[in-house]
Image (cartoon, grey):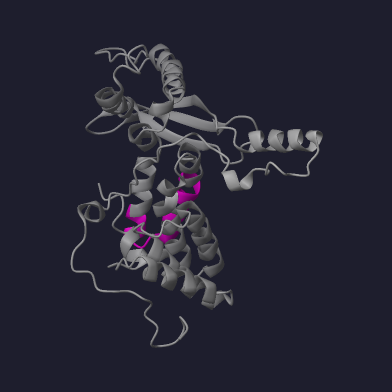
C-alpha cells in the first residue's frame, strides 16, 4: 500500500501517555556533549592505505579545513531609539558573520538593553566563575539616550558578545543560543500556528542559518525549525522545497530513531516523496524497520508536533 492510497495511514499508533520531556514541547533539545568536531574512525585512511606520504598529508589538510570550528564575528552595527506610549528604549542591531570565508547568510537581529541584561543574569546562574572577568555595561538612571552613551554601549556589547563566544561552554549554552535565536523562532512558530506560512518562512530563512552555526556541535537542535520549514512549504503547496527541508532535518537527526521527530518526519517525507515521484519505498522501509527495532508509538503528525514548539 502506498502513501497515496485511501487506506494509507502510516504505522502511526495510539499513544495513551507522553513523557514529561515530550509534554514540555519547548522547542529545545539539550546540547550534545563532545568535541567541536571529529572524524569518524571509519572515514579515515586505513593503516594499509596505498596513499603516498604527500597524498596523506594533503588528505589530512583537507580534513582539518573541513572540521575547523565555525568562528563567528559579532558587530553592533547600529542603534535606534524606540519611543512608545509606555516605554522608551534603545534597540541595538547585531550582525553575526562567519569568519574565514564569504558568508552569504550573515544574521541581523535586534536586542535591547534588557535582553542583554537577562542574558547576563541567566549566565551567572551557571557560569559565574567562567564569566567573572567579563564586564557587563552598567545601567544608568540618566543619559541612556544620548549619542555618546549609545555609541559607548554599542562597543561594549560587541566586546561582551565576543568575549562570551570565546568561552566554549558559554557559546554552547542554552542561554547564549537562546539569546541570539529564540525571539525570532518564537515569532516564526507563532506565525506557523496562525497559518501565516509565508511570514513564518521569511523569519525561518533568516534565523535557521545562524542557529546551524551556533549548534554545529549538536545539529539535532535545528530539527524543529527545519521541520517547521517543511510544514510551511508543504501547506503553501511547494512540495519540492518541503522535501529539501525534510532532507536537511533527516541529516541532522543522524538516524536517531528514538527522537520524537524521527517517525513523524519520515512519515511526512514518505508522502512528499510519493507526490514528487521520488523513491518513497526506501523511506517507508526505513520507518518500518525502525519501528520493528525500537517500537515507539507517536501521537502527532509532523505539523501537530511543530505547532507545539516555542510556546513560551
Residue furthest front in the image: 48
Q: Which residue is pictured at 42% across the width and 53% down the height? A: 223
| Viewer-side residue, 210 vs 167 | 167
Residue 244 vs 99, above or below: the answer is: below
**Does 203 lie within the magenta span?**
yes
Q: Which residue is pictured at 38% across the width and 13% down the height? A: 149
| Viewer-side residue, 192 vs 278 | 278
Q: Which residue is pictured at 52% across the width and 69% down the height? A: 239
Image position, residue 20 (x, y; %): 20, 53
Q: Report the magenta residues as a range.
A: 190-207
Residue 240 vs 90, above or below: the answer is: below
Residue 311 vs 280, above or below: the answer is: above
143 horizontally vs 168: left or right: left
Image position, residue 291 (x, y; %): 37, 69
Image position, residue 36 (x, y; %): 50, 34
65 horizontally vs 150: left or right: right
Query: Based on the displayed image, in which of its 4 quarters is residue 81 positioned?
Result: top left
Q: Is residue 235 visible?
A: no
Magenta region, main secondary structure: helix
| Viewer-side residue, 42 vs 151 | 42
The image shows a total of numbered marks equal to 0
Q: Is residue 133 visible?
A: yes
Image position, residue 138 (x, y; %): 30, 13
Quarter of the image that includes the N terminus: bottom left
Amino acid at each position: 500500500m502506498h502513501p497515496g492510497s485511501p487506506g494509507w495511514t502510516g504505522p502511526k499508533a495510539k499513544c495513551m501517555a507522553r513523557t514529561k520531556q515530550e509534554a514540555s514541547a519547548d522547542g529545545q533539545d539539550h546540547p550534545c556533549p563532545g568535541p567541536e568536531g571529529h572524524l569518524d574512525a571509519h572515514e579515515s585512511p586505513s593503516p594499509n592505505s596505498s596513499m603516498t606520504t604527500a597524498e596523506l598529508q594533503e588528505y589530512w589538510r583537507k580534513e582539518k579545513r573541513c572540521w575547523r570550528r565555525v568562528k563567528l564575528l559579532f558587530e553592533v552595527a547600529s542603534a535606534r531609539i524606540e519611543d512608545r506610549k509606555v516605554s522608551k528604549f534603545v534597540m541595538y542591531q547585531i550582525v553575526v558573520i562567519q569568519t574565514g570565508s564569504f558568508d552569504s547568510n550573515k544574521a541581523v537581529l535586534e536586542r535591547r538593553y534588557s535582553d542583554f541584561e537577562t542574558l547576563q543574569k541567566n549566565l551567572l546562574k551557571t557560569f559565574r566563575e567562567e564569566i567573572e572577568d567579563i564586564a557587563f555595561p552598567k545601567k544608568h538612571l540618566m543619559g541612556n539616550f544620548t549619542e555618546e552613551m549609545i555609541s559607548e554601549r554599542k562597543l561594549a556589547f560587541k566586546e561582551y558578545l565576543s568575549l562570551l563566544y570565546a568561552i566554549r561552554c558559554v557559546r554552547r549554552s542554552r542561554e547564549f543560543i537562546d539569546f541570539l535565536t529564540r525571539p525570532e523562532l518564537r515569532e516564526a512558530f507563532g506565525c506557523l500556528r496562525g497559518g501565516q506560512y509565508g511570514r513564518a518562512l521569511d523569519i525561518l530563512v533568516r534565523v535557521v542559518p545562524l542557529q546551524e552555526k551556533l549548534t554545529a556541535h549538536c545539529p539535532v537542535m535545528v530539527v524543529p525549525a527545519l521541520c517547521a520549514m517543511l510544514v510551511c512549504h508543504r501547506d503553501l503547496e511547494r512540495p519540492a522545497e518541503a522535501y529539501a527541508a525534510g532532507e536537511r532535518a533527516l541529516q541532522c537527526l543522524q538516524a536517531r530513531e528514538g527522537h520524537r521527530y524521527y517517525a513523524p518526519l519520515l512519515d511526512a517525507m514518505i508522502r512528499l516523496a510519493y507526490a514528487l515521484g521520488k523513491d518513497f519505498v526506501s523511506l517507508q522501509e526505513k520507518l518500518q524497520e525502525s519501528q520493528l527495532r525500537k517500537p515507539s508509538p507517536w501521537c502527532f503528525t509532523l505539523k501537530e508536533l511543530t505547532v507545539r514548539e516555542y510556546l513560551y
